[in-house]
């Protein structure tokens, strides 16, 4: 090998060293300046191959390596390729999230044919759902003449919330929902009342683009249960007092008691004792009345210088007022929306027992005996008061109407709506409150014992027991909301190209037994907004 050949070889080695290490460039060029321009030029790093799966949902290629394919005509035993699609969206989502098996990486994308899928689905954040594909002939494009917006993938189960996005393990992973039409059936949420088309669970992230999210109607609230139509328990008739001349000190008639269902008792006052020179006063009835009624169930006075007096009638139990109608926004949770029932009617007050009648006496100050010689000399005993009637039960509050909410976004979730239509429908009307029960009748007091010879020897009768108060009518249930979006603790972005609108909110339920047009016991109407934040002050009154 000649000197030039050997030098060229050395120069190539130096050039290789320069290309690999870079630090010997000056040394090599100083030693061999005539070869540097030809020998030391390093090839640029090769460009990475293009990502064939990248691009916008409407135009990116639909390749087997890019996603899992699903069609109404597919088979869930298939691998989910273009040539062998699966049949159900949820199965396709599972393959996209975890891979088809055999070490194949998860594609995290689903391509769905246009058509109707009557299933509710759960989509992990980071798995895309691209619908509206033209599948005839194996094309799977979005822009075909029968594809795209004119032939969307329709998700429309008969029961349940059609689309739920849940947080995935991948931090900040976001799902793109594209080219689908999500239709919630009327009153199809888990509570059987509301209609909700889509829920973002806590921490989930989703972009809704070129899609329609449509809630159905909420169900009207059930009326509150009426209290029994028959009256509450009535009082018990008081006991009669013993006649004169039956004892030197005839004990007053024993009290009678009505025990009501809530443990409250109405007791007639015991009759006064019959005595020799004086009769005893009767006892007052119970329970003691509230306020200042005209009659207070006081016991009658016994005979002294004058004849005895009858026991006073017991006070009627207080009727309960109509309960308040429901108000407030309710709350959002994983199951949808929970509204507010009307307040239950309160129980009416128990009637007070009548006062016991006063007892008689057997003789006057001037020795005038009422009783024959040889017999006991005491006057007649007073009769006990009749017990009062029980208070009526209150009616049950009306149930709330179901809400109609297109999208619910819960704590920590992130929702973007772009170039899509999101519509609420009609919220259900609140249910009417139940009616209260009439209170029981108060009962007669017992008769005083019979006297002889002198009027003061007789016993006096007990007072009537008071009537039980009527149970309260209940309040109406809250009207169901109509919202495009309802959120709590979530981030929501609505672009200018999006259409987000409510339908019509439900009317608040009327109070039980209320006259038409009365506001007493009426609940609030539902809220009607394009977007309502349950975690923010409501500065706008419901419509």
Image (cartoon, rainbow, N blue to C red):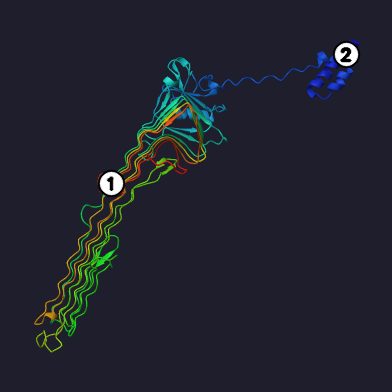
Residue 453, picture quadrant: bottom left
Decide: marks 2, 1 in contact (CB < 8 A)? Answer: no
Q: Quadrant of the C terminus?
A: top left
| Secondary element at image label 2 | helix
Which label lies toward us, 2 or 1? 1
State how far apart marks 2 and 1 are (Cα): 111 Å
Residue 502: x and y in percent read 40, 33
Q: Is residue 79 in sight in this rendering? A: no
The residue to which callout 2 is attached is 6
Q: Closest to the observer: 387 or 536? A: 536
Within the image, what quadrant is residue 337 found in? top left
- Residue furthest out toward the right: 3
Tell me if 63 is positioned left or right of 38 in this view.
left
Helix, strand, or loop for circle 1? loop
Q: Earlier in the sequence, mark 2 or mark 1?
A: 2
* Nearer to me, 520 or 132: 520
Judge from the rendering whether residue 89 lies leftward or rightward of residue 473; answer left or right: right
Find disc 1 in the rendering and name its residue: 518
Is any atom of residue 398 visible in this view? Answer: yes
Q: Say above or below: 116 vs 258.
A: above
């Amino acid at each position: 090998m000649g000197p030039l050949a050997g030098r060229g070889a050395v120069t190539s080695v130096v050039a290789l060293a320069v290309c690999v290490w870079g630090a010997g460039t000056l040394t090599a060029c100083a030693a061999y300046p005539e070869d540097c321009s030809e020998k030391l030029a390093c090839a640029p790093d090769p460009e990475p191959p293009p990502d064939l799966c990248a691009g916008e949902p409407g135009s990116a290629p639909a390749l087997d390596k890019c996603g899992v394919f699903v069609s109404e005509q597919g088979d869930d035993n298939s691998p989910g390729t273009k040539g062998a699609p699966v049949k159900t969206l949820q199965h396709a989502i599972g393959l996209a999230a975890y891979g088809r098996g055999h070490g194949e990486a998860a594609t995290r994308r689903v391509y769905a044919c246009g058509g109707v899928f009557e299933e509710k689905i759960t989509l992990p954040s980071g798995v895309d759902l691209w619908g509206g594909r033209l599948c005839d002939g194996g094309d799977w494009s979005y822009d075909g003449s029968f594809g795209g917006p004119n032939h969307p993938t329709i998700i429309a189960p008969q029961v349940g919330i059609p689309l739920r996005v849940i947080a995935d393990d991948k931090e900040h992973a976001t799902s793109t929902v594209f080219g689908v039409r999500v239709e919630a059936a009327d009153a199809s949420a888990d509570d059987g009342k509301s209609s909700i088309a889509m829920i973002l669970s806590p921490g989930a992230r989703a972009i809704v683009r070129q899609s329609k999210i449509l809630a159905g109607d909420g169900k009207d609230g059930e009326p509150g249960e009426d209290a029994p139509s028959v009256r509450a328990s009535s009082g018990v008739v008081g006991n009669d007092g013993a006649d004169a001349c039956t004892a030197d000190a005839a004990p007053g008639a024993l009290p009678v008691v009505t025990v009501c269902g809530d443990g409250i008792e109405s007791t007639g006052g015991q009759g006064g004792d019959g005595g020799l020179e004086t009769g005893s006063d009767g006892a007052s009835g119970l329970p003691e009345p509230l306020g200042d009624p005209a009659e207070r169930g006081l016991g009658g006075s016994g005979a002294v210088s004058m004849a005895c007096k009858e026991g006073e009638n017991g006070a009627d139990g207080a009727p309960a007022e109509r309960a308040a109608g429901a108000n407030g926004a309710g709350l959002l949770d994983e199951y949808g929306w929970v509204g507010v029932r009307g307040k239950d009617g309160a129980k009416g007050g128990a009637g007070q027992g009548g006062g016991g009648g006063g007892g008689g006496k057997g003789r006057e100050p001037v020795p005038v005996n009422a009783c024959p010689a040889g017999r006991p000399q005491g006057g007649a005993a007073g009769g006990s008061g009749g017990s009062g009637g029980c208070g009526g039960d209150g009616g049950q509050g009306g149930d709330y109407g179901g809400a109609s909410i297109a999208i619910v976004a819960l704590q920590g979730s992130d929702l973007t709506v772009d170039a899509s239509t999101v519509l609420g429908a009609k919220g259900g009307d609140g249910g009417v409150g139940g009616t209260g029960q009439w209170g029981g009748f108060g009962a007669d007091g017992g008769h005083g014992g019979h006297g002889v010879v002198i009027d003061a020897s007789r016993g006096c009768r007990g007072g009537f027991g008071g009537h039980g108060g009527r149970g309260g009518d209940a309040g109406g249930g809250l009207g169901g909301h109509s919202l495009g979006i309802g959120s709590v603790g979530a981030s929501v972005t609505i672009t200018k190209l999006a259409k987000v609108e409510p339908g019509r909110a439900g009317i608040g339920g009327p109070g039980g037994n209320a006259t038409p047009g009365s506001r007493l016991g009426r609940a609030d109407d539902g809220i009607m907004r394009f977007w309502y934040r349950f975690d923010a002050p409501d500065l706008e009154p419901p419509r």
